[in-house]
Image (cartoon, rainbow, N blue to C red):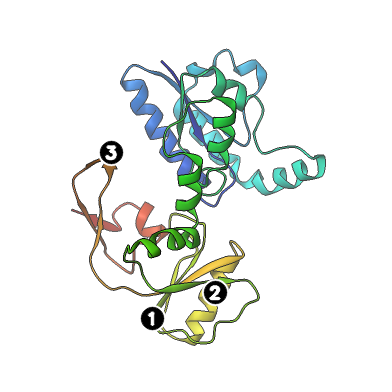
């Protein structure tokens, strides 16, 4: 089976996506599959398409991470030229593969846009469909769908750039509406911290969520094919489960 592992992209979680995809690809190869990574945004040169499944993963991972500083410049260049999001030969590779493993994180990866394009093109991919992805990625939409169904969620509001909030109960949590990996998330205990948290969250996108802070133990439960996998308790050694504690080795105890 030929499997394209889709990685990289343009989000704030680009480098995490590359690491995720590298580990996934290593596992697929150990299990006997023809698998390799392609950066959804930068793509691959035509001369490398025929030898796509023969690349050295360690070198490829390093190469893709070295391209991260060029994302903003490339985005501007494509905008000026009227070019699209997908990199060279990406869609062609995905169409030829038996399935695409979605190793992308964040916007233009988990928000349903690529999933919708793949469904129109008949490309098989892993994960949820485009509607579920879109609703799940937007914390504002998630609330609008779940709260009326009686699902317990923290109280809060969506705040758009330029709007003012009259009253905030402290402590509160401030986060970008559609981000992941806790990028731009802050816990504010007073007005000064709240203003700083808003500035931080709005630096990533134009809509943020302000929610009540819920103190308690944190658990993660994955569900696969309708079956709950073993429960994991997450205990950061310092602070909350932010970007650093998620990805810096030794920062969190997982039981």
Query: Which quadrant of the view contains residue 152?
Result: bottom left
Q: For the residues marked 1 and 2, what is the alpha-carbon distance in whole angstroms? A: 14 Å
* Residue at the far right in the pictured view: 81
Q: Nearer the viewer, residue 252 or 173?
A: 173
* Mark 3 vs mark 1: in front: 3
Q: Which of 100 and 184 is in front in this view?
A: 100
Q: For the residues marked 2 and 3, what is the alpha-carbon distance in whole angstroms? A: 36 Å
- Quadrant (top left/top right/bottom left/bottom right) for the N terminus: top left
Callout 1 secondary element: loop
- Residue linked to disc 1: 171
Q: For the residues marked 3 and 1, what is the alpha-carbon distance in whole angstroms? A: 35 Å
Image coordinates for residue 22, horizontal then vertical, percent: 42, 33
Horizontally, is 71 left or right of 191 in the view? Answer: right
Horizontally, is 117 left or right of 105 in the view? Answer: right
Query: Which quadrant of the view contains residue 33?
Result: top left
Q: Residue at x 65, y 45 (%)?
A: 71
Determine contact: label 1, label 2, CB under 8 Å. no
Query: Which quadrant of the view contains residue 3?
Result: top left
- Residue linked to disc 2: 198
Q: Residues within 10 Å of mark 1 (few under 14, many from 20)?
A: some
Which is more N-terminal, label 3 or label 2? 2
Horizontally, is 20 left or right of 228 in the view? Answer: right
* Mark 2 vs mark 3: in front: 3
The mark tally for this picture is: 3
């Amino acid at each position: 089976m030929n499997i394209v592992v889709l990685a990289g992209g343009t989000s704030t979680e680009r480098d995490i996506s590359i690491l995720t995809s590298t580990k996934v690809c290593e596992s697929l190869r150990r299990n006997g599959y023809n698998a390799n990574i392609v950066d959804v945004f930068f793509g691959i040169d035509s001369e490398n398409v025929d030898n796509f499944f023969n690349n050295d993963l360690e070198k490829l991972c390093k190469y893709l991470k070295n391209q991260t500083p060029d994302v903003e410049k490339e985005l501007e260049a494509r905008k000026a030229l009227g070019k699209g999001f997908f990199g060279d030969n990406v869609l062609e590779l995905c169409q030829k593969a038996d399935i695409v493993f979605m190793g992308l994180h964040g916007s233009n990866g988990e928000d349903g846009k690529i999933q919708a394009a793949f469904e129109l093109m008949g490309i098989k991919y892993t994960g949820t469909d485009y509607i579920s992805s879109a609703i799940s990625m937007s914390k504002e939409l998630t609330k609008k769908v779940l709260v009326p169904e009686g699902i317990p969620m923290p109280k809060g509001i969506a705040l758009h750039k330029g709007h003012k909030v009259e009253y905030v109960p402290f402590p509160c949590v401030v986060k970008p509406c559609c981000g992941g990996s806790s990028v731009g998330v802050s816990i504010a205990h007073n007005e000064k911290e709240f203003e700083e948290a808003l500035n931080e969250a709005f630096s990533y996108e134009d809509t943020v969520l302000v929610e009540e802070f819920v103190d308690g133990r944190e658990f993660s439960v994955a569900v696969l094919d309708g079956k709950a996998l073993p429960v994991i308790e997450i205990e950061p050694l310092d602070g909350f489960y932010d970007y650093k504690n998620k990805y810096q080795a030794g920062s969190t105890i997982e039981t």
